[in-house]
Image (cartoon, grey):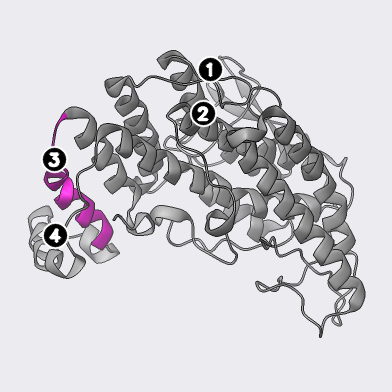
Amino acid sequence: MIDEDKLDLRTIASIVKAATTGGHTTQFAMPAHRLAFGTEAARSTAKSAVDAAVEALLPKAGPPPPELSGIDAIKLALRTALRLEFATIPPYLTALWSIIDQAHPVAISIRAIAHEEMLHLSLLCNLLSALDERPSLTGEAVPRFPSRLPSGVHPEIELRLEGFGPRTLDTFMEIERPKVAIPIEGEPLETFPPEDVTIGEFYEELLQGINRLNPPLDARRQIAGPFTWFVMTKLGDVEQAIKLIMAQGEGASGVPFPKYKHHLSHYYRFKSLKLLTKLEWDEDAKLLRKKDQIPAPAVFTLAPPSPEGYGPAAPRELRTASNRFENTYSQMLRLLEESWLEGGDKSFLRALELMFELGPLAQTIMRIGTPDGRGYCPSFRYLP
């Protein structure tokens, strides 16, 4: 039995490659473990010395992951991608709802990003369903906070539920860092750590693995509509879905989108909010130009949420509002999961109705003052 939580993205990409090319996972053990044990010191050491250190550590780390069939390796990678997308949504929504005026340009921008993350999640659920696996969106699959991103992605980041502000934007930008930096007018060209390539490599290997395997795709339990866009019945559909996820967010290779040159990837939309300046792509100069200033929004200053919810010691008003939020959130997740079982479009549309109820419920919680004058924060707990 594989403990999926202990596999990093490069290891999973290696498993996909081995399983869909007829190779063996053992041949990928060295690069995977080198990544797992790589530290700042190790990365500055000669490759041969790192290999020797890794070989000494392999017995302690356990054997490399077992070999899987091609289809099981693809499903493993898709479950990992689903957990990664899911983990970003509650922090993005918390920052969004902490903006008092939900019609503010900053709120509009973050809402669009959160909706695209929901699109990514739904497309991955469609693809899992096309391969005859029901996606899991309840119980242990629900992310808890504070936490780390799944599969060792950006291990330096702690995901927290907190209001919009410079620190939140820094975290979001770190999550969404692309493989390739894009010049911004009047700003130094950024450099990104080489490990940021990992997410892009993971999605590329996933896509190549599906292309090599060419599995049959079942449309019967896929959803089409808001936040899903299309079902997948052929390899071209799969490529469109995965490349869309890569272009918009994690794994992005640059901006703008090939077909929509006024759209920026998530990193540069967050960068725009950090600069409080609209960024616009100049096709001739191949850079982002600064345009209109964006006013800073008024926000609720939030206290950290209670990971275990608000108990009897909390104000009654808060407990009532938090229970409504958590019950609505939990029911929404159950309906979403049911959408890819027997519920279909009916369950999916009802889940969307509940999703749009969450914002006002969250802001009700945020308006309740703590003893030190801050607002409370929803905890995004799942209630069975």
Q: Callout 3: helix, strand or loop?
A: loop
Q: Residue at x 36, y 54 (%)?
A: 4
Q: Determine whether label 1 and label 2 are within 8 Å by CB.
A: yes
> Dot 2: few (<14), some (14–19), or many (≥20) neighbours within 10 Å?
many
Q: Which mark is residue 50?
A: 4
Separation of marks 4 and 3 at Cα, in angstroms: 22 Å
Separation of marks 3 and 2 at Cα, in angstroms: 31 Å
Q: Earlier in the sequence, mark 3 or mark 2?
A: 3
Q: Position of residue 138 (x, y in %)?
A: 59, 52
Mark 3 residue type: His
Quarter the C terminus occupies: bottom right
- The span picked out in magenta is 22-37
Residue under label 2: 247
Q: Earlier in the sequence, mark 1 or mark 4?
A: 4
Q: Determine whether label 3 and label 1 are within 8 Å by CB.
A: no
Q: Position of residue 288 (x, y in %)?
A: 60, 29
Separation of marks 1 and 2 at Cα, in angstroms: 8 Å
Q: Callout 1: helix, strand or loop?
A: loop
Q: Which mark is residue 93?
A: none
Mark 4 residue type: Val
Residue under label 1: 258
Q: Callout 2: helix, strand or loop?
A: helix
Q: Is residue 199 above or below residue 206?
A: below
Q: Is residue 188 above or below residue 159?
A: above
Residue under label 3: 24
Q: Nearer the viewer, mark 4 or mark 3?
A: 3
